Structure formats: structure tokens, C-alpha cells
Amino acid sequence: KTEELIEEYMKLQGVLEQVFPDAKVKVEHVSADKESTISCLNELVDALNEMDTLMIDDVIEKFGQFDFEDDAEVDMFEQLRGAAEEYDIDTCLQIAGEWQKYLN
């Protein structure tokens, strides 16, 4: 059932982008500090454990507003975003755990 809902969501997202091609969301970037990053990682882990795909997307979107100064964090975010786009829960949890260790 979850996979069917994910597929439906992905189809709708593509249709909406076609219908509203000019509806681009302006994103304000903010400097990524340790506290904000840890807070988002905790939110993400909760969403992953609950398999809440909408919350996962929301947290990834929030992460997308961060300007990471550390190349390692940029790389972890890119990996995390890729895994989240594929709804690969296990990989997301692994990356989030590594990132939390990195920050501590």
C-alpha cells in the first residue's frame, strides 16, 4: 500500500509541475549551524522511523535551504537527498546516523 501511495504521489508531482511550470518557489538560504542541522536530522530520523513520506520531504526541503560550509556536510546532504528521492529508508537512516556522529 505504501509503495502505491508513493507512486501516486510521484505521478501527481510531475503533473503539477507541468500544469504550473512558472510556479517556482523562492528559497531563502540560511547558514547551516550545528544546532539547526542536528534538529533537522532528529526530525528526519523521526519521520523515517514513522515512514512518514510527507514529513521526510518537508525535512529534506528544509535542509535544501541550508548553506553548508563544510564539504563533507554538502556531500552527506546530496547523498541523503538522493536516498530520500528514492524513498530508501535504510540508506537515509544510515546517512543521518553518520552525519549525527560527524557533528558530535
Image (cartoon, rainbow, N blue to C red):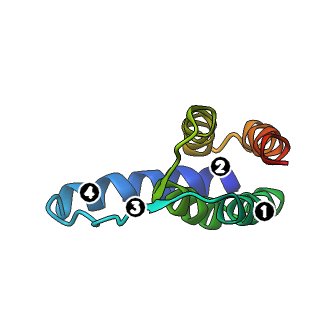
Q: Name the quarter where the N terminus is drawn.
A: bottom right
Residue 62 shown left or right of residue 17 in the figure: right
Q: Are marks 3 and 2 in contact (CB under 8 Å)?
A: no
Residue reaching furthest left? 22
Location of mark 4 (residue): 17
Amino acid under label 1? Asn
Q: To which residue does mark 2 refer?
A: 3
Residue under circle 3?
29
Asked whether the beta carbons under mark 4 and mark 3 sit within 8 Å of each other, the answer is: no
Kindly identify the amino acid type of the residue bearing the numbered disc 3. Answer: His
Q: Earlier in the sequence, mark 1 or mark 2?
A: 2
- How packed mark 3 is, by other alpha carbons closer than 10 Å (few <14, some 14-19, many 20 or more), is few
Q: Pointer 1 and pointer 3: residues touching (CB < 8 Å)?
A: no
- In three-dimensional space, the C-alpha distance between marks 3 and 2, rounded to whole angstroms, equals 32 Å
Point out the frontmost of discs 1 and 3. Answer: 3
Q: Quadrant of residue 70?
A: top right
Lower sequence index among marks 4 and 3: 4
Frontmost of labels 1 and 4 is: 1
Residue 97 position (above or below residue 26) = above
Q: Nearer the viewer, residue 34 or 54?
A: 34
Mark 4 and mark 3: span between their CA atoms? 22 Å
Q: In front of the other: label 3 or label 2?
A: 3
Alpha carbon distance from label 1 to label 4: 30 Å
Name the residue that disc number 1 marks.
42
Is 75 above or below relative to 38?
A: above
- Please report the residue visible at 79 percent of the width from the left and 44 percent of the height from the top: 93
When asked about the image quadrant of residue 80, the answer is top right
